[in-house]
Amino acid sequence: ARMEEIYHESRPSLVLISSPNNPTGNRLEAGELEHLLGIMTGSVVVLDEAYSLFFNGSAANVTDLVRRFPNLIVIRTFSKYYGLAGLRIGYALTGGSHDRFALFSARYLGFNRLSEQVALAALDSKEYYGDVCRKMTSDLDMLFNEFSAMPGFRPFRSYANFILVEIPLSIKADLKQYLSSRNMIIKFMDEESLNSHIRVTIGTQEQNRLLVSMIKTFLKERKIL
């Protein structure tokens, strides 16, 4: 509702929607997204789906959307799901209103041949990436449940490869020092509205369980758990 209000107030030429977003990992459900697209027909809408493949491995839904909404551009990257951030490669699906932009992109914004070949190889490795994704999403549920059981911790449901967790502000500095001194690095948020939160990127299953064990030990030593 608030996005609708802002749109009607501002009437922007360009709207950028990130779903799932960073740092919360939440997303717009299909019905919510289609409702917004039906309202924002007077603007170019860019839908950033950098994290979408972790819970949505199909392109069928976005293919349908760009057909129905010619003002839409959907952008995806190989940096997250495929773990190829160093290649700086991605792709877009564009609605019919963006033919000139697609031509410009193809002519002036191409990739080197090596990056293209690695990206194509990644697309052909569905079994490998599917196995990695299943392990990550399973551990995402594990972390959500573990953090939910810790006193003063509040995890947010995520559809990306990380989880945002609100922690007691009183333990923030000590927990950061405790983990970093043991070579366990996670992101301690320091923004105005997120100054009592951590963001944990999903690692290997061994790393994820080690993090939970370390935090539990920290809480037990301080008689919080």
Image (tube, helix red, strand yellow):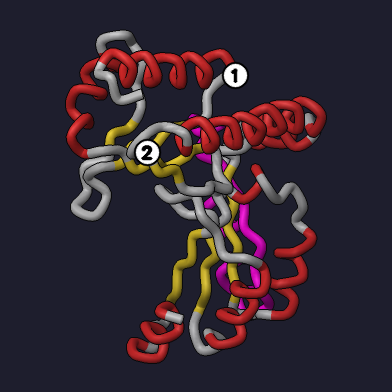
- Report which residue position mark 2 lands on: 153
Which quadrant, please, contains the C terminus?
A: top left
Say if residue 108 shows up in the picture: no
State the residue at coordinates (24%, 24%). Answer: 176
Query: Does the segment drawn in magenta span residue 87?
Result: yes
Q: Are marks 2 and 1 in contact (CB under 8 Å)?
A: no
How many labels, in total?
2
Dividing the picture into quadrants, the one containing residue 16 is bottom left
Dividing the picture into quadrants, the one containing residue 152 is top left
- Circle 2 sits in a helix, a strand or a loop, which is it? loop
State the residue at coordinates (56%, 69%). Answer: 101
Dividing the picture into quadrants, the one containing residue 184 is top left
- Report which residue position mark 1 lands on: 205
* Rendered location of residue 85, percent (x, y): 51, 33
**Amino acid type shown at disc 1:** Gln
Task: Look at the picture and state if 202 lies above or below 35.
Answer: above
State the residue at coordinates (81%, 29%). Answer: 127
Q: Which residues are magenta?
A: 83-109
Is residue 14 shown left or right of residue 121? left
Which of 71 and 126 lies nearest the eye of the viewer?
Answer: 126
